[in-house]
Amino acid sequence: MGKTEVAKALAGVAGARLIRLQCHEGIDLHHALYDWDYPRQLLHLRAGADEPLYSERFLLRRPLLEALEATDPVVLLIDEIDRADDEFEAFLLEFMSDFQVSIPELGTITAQRRPLVVVTSNRTRELHDALKRRCLYHWIDYPTPQREAEIVRARLPGVPDEIAERVCGAVARLRGEELYKLPGVGETIAWAQALLALDDADLDETLGVVLKVREDIERTRERGVLHGA
């Protein structure tokens, strides 16, 4: 959640539009750059129209092409790039070097106004050095419990201080454990929401809101991590 908020905050400060490309396993150019509207092209063929099949009328613009063609200020968020494969990462490296792409049927498209690009990674795999050299690196660590409580209050106006502080203190304890998946700020906010909805229920009873791996829940309960929280 924190990494994505950086792009949103940058867009707000710059007065720019945010365009987001969510990376995932198997992502390719058809998901990221462009595709063709094949159903409309088929109808076009059946109608016997003379317009070329591969024209801008049938072009489906994906986030990267949308960012290239934008004439207004744009922040392009390439989210969780580590989920994509090496081949797609290599394409992004070329894309961000020249900010232009070639569409065989239409020619080369060059950015009229280069977007500000934010690339995020959860470090599920190492990124290539060539890509990292072209980036300004910033590590976003977990906030302190006090700072996280401020974030919870900002996201959930009216949340009692006792709930915000209790949840943030409990999350800080969880992050000190060796868990498969440590909770992020988004889980902290969701936990506070759950306590509000359930009229300040017990933390242990709502542990599944913040931990999503059975072994993590069992380990937390066996070790009494939340005891007294």
Image (tube, grey):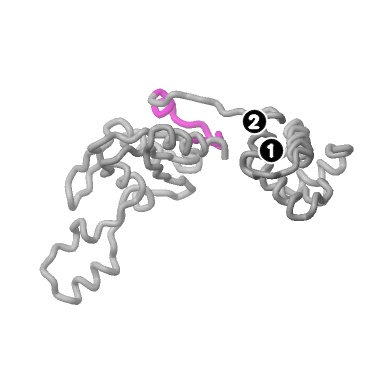
Asked whether 128 falls inside the magenta stretch, the response is yes
Q: Residue at x 22, y 48 (%)?
A: 103
In the rendered view, tell whether residue 191 sits above or below residue 121: below
Q: Amino acid at mark 1?
A: Leu
Quadrant where the N terminus lies?
top right
Q: What is the number of the mark on residue 182?
A: 1
Residue 39 is situated, as x and y percent measured from the top left of the image, at 29, 69
> What's the magenta bit mostly, secondary-structure-wise?
loop
Horizontal relation, residue 108 to residue 178: left or right: left
Horizontal relation, residue 198 to residue 99: left or right: right
In the rendered view, tell whether residue 133 sits above or below residue 218: above
Q: Residue at x 66, y 29 (%)?
A: 147
Q: What is the number of the mark on residue 142?
A: 2
Toward which corner of the image does residue 184 lie, by quadrant? top right
Count of numbered circles in the view: 2
Give the residues in magenta.
Answer: 120-133
Give the CA distance from mark 1 to mark 2: 10 Å
Horizontal relation, residue 190 to residue 130: left or right: right
Residue extending farthest front: 158
Quadrant where the C terminus lies?
top right
Q: Amino acid at mark 2?
A: Tyr
- Label 2 element class: loop
Toward which corner of the image does residue 220 lie, by quadrant? top right
For the residue pair 93 and 189, the one nearer the viewer reads as 189
Category of crowding for the residue at label 2, using alpha-carbon neighbours closer than 10 angstroms: few (below 14), some (14–19), many (at least 20):
some
Q: Residue at x 26, y 68 (%)?
A: 40
Residue 144 is situated, as x and y percent measured from the top left of the image, at 69, 28
Residue 130 is situated, as x and y percent measured from the top left of the image, at 39, 26
Asked if marks 1 and 2 touch (Cβ < 8 Å), the reply is: yes
Asked whether 2 falls inside the magenta stretch, the response is no
Residue 27 is situated, as x and y percent measured from the top left of the image, at 42, 49
